[in-house]
Image: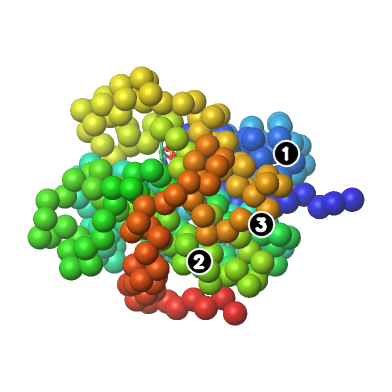
Amino acid sequence: MMENRICVITGATSGIGRQTALQLAKKKYSIQIIGRNKEKCEAILKEVETIFPNGGHQFFVGDFENLGDVKMVTNLLLKNLPRIDVLINNAGCVYQDKKISEIGVEQTLHTNHLAPFLFTSRLMPLVKKGIEPRIVNVASDSHYRGKFNFEDLNYDKSRYFVMTAYERSKLANVLFTNYLAEKIKDMGILANSLHPGVVKTQIGQKNTGSFFGWAWRAMTAVMGISEEEGAKTSVFLASSEDAKTVTGKYFDKSKEKRMSKLAADTALSNKLWNWSEEVLGEQFDFS
Ligand SMILES: NC(=O)c1ccc[n+]([C@@H]2O[C@H](COP(=O)([O-])OP(=O)(O)OC[C@H]3O[C@@H](n4cnc5c(N)ncnc54)[C@H](OP(=O)(O)O)[C@@H]3O)[C@@H](O)[C@H]2O)c1
């Protein structure tokens, strides 16, 4: 009998991540839920257990604003899992007001890029043991507007704006995916990034004020797709036979799409990788 595939999903407690977990549980994946809120993790665990009983599902609690939590969760996963077949970096957020993280980095870049960078890199020993392993990074079409100015990473010389910081963090997701894909291609591990669509989730109502929250709700009410629909490209890249060999690409509506010119810039992805290792004080070669 074939073993069930083991899938780790960050931000599986709401929105696109929760739906991705439910849809993969229907396909008999063993779901490893990563969330920052224990009660929400318990609730989604119950849901996946109902869909696919005794699937070896578990949850692990950690707040990705905190690198100590990222390391603690990776340590638990390294101890508890035999391997990872699919790793979905889905957790993400916006910050209406500028915030500087515990290590002195603008918080959107910290939570949306540095945390999954560290999470993925530390989990690579388990991914290497995976069966036809795949890494799926939830980016966004916002990356098309993203820019990097390494001279002003914390917006000390320019004005902070919530969307500018978010767009940059999503560009970082695509750059990270591309560099990683190249680094691990000879190990038979796939890594792709995606746009889930404009999805009616609560992301615009977290860490924001009432106006931004209202504008987000109004915009997604008019042009947003459902969370079920929004999970489809993640599920496609995680599980489809049609995505069995593709790596280092960007997807939308389960189809490959051209990424931004900056996202495809290998010198920039190299620079971001080196900066990320430097600021985290860790080096990763995966050999
Ligand atoms: N919605 C869209 O239109 C859209 C478009 C393009 C890309 N995306 C991307 O899709 C991904 C999922 O977003 P969503 O729209 O589904 O939003 P969501 O419903 O707010 O879900 C985000 C998930 O990330 C978790 N999360 C947020 N901050 C975290 C932190 N500090 N530590 C740990 N977990 C954290 C949330 O936990 P809680 O449940 O505790 O809040 C939640 O599980 C994000 O990467 C986002 O950038 C969304």
Q: Earlier in the sequence, mark 3 or mark 2?
A: 2
- Mark 3 or 1: in front is 3
Q: Which residue is mark 1?
A: 27
Q: Earlier in the sequence, mark 3 or mark 1?
A: 1
Q: CA distance from mark 1 to mark 2?
A: 27 Å
Q: Which residue is mark 3?
A: 245
- Mark 1 or 2: in front is 2
Percent from the top left, x then y, of residue 230?
51, 33
Q: Are marks 3 and 2 in contact (CB under 8 Å)?
A: no
Q: Residue at x 16, y 57 (%)?
A: 155
Foreground residue, 59 or 16? 16
Q: Is residue 244 above or below residue 28?
A: below
Q: Amino acid at mark 2?
A: Leu
Q: Which residue is mark 2?
A: 180
Q: Is residue 131 above or below residue 276?
A: above
Q: Is residue 150 left or right of residue 239?
A: left
Q: Cβ of disc 2 within 8 Å of ligand 1?
A: no
Mark 1 surroundings: few (<14), some (14-19) or many (≥20) residues within 10 A: some
- Mark 3 or 2: in front is 3
Secondary structure under tag 2 reads helix
Percent from the top left, x then y, of residue 94?
31, 43
Q: Cβ of disc 3 within 8 Å of ligand 1?
A: no
Q: Residue at x 49, y 41 (%)?
A: 252
Q: Amino acid at mark 1?
A: Lys
Q: CA distance from mark 3 to mark 2?
A: 15 Å
Mark 3 surroundings: few (<14), some (14-19) or many (≥20) residues within 10 A: few
Instruction: Choose top left, top right, bottom left or bottom right for residue 101.
Output: bottom left
Mark 2 surroundings: few (<14), some (14-19) or many (≥20) residues within 10 A: many
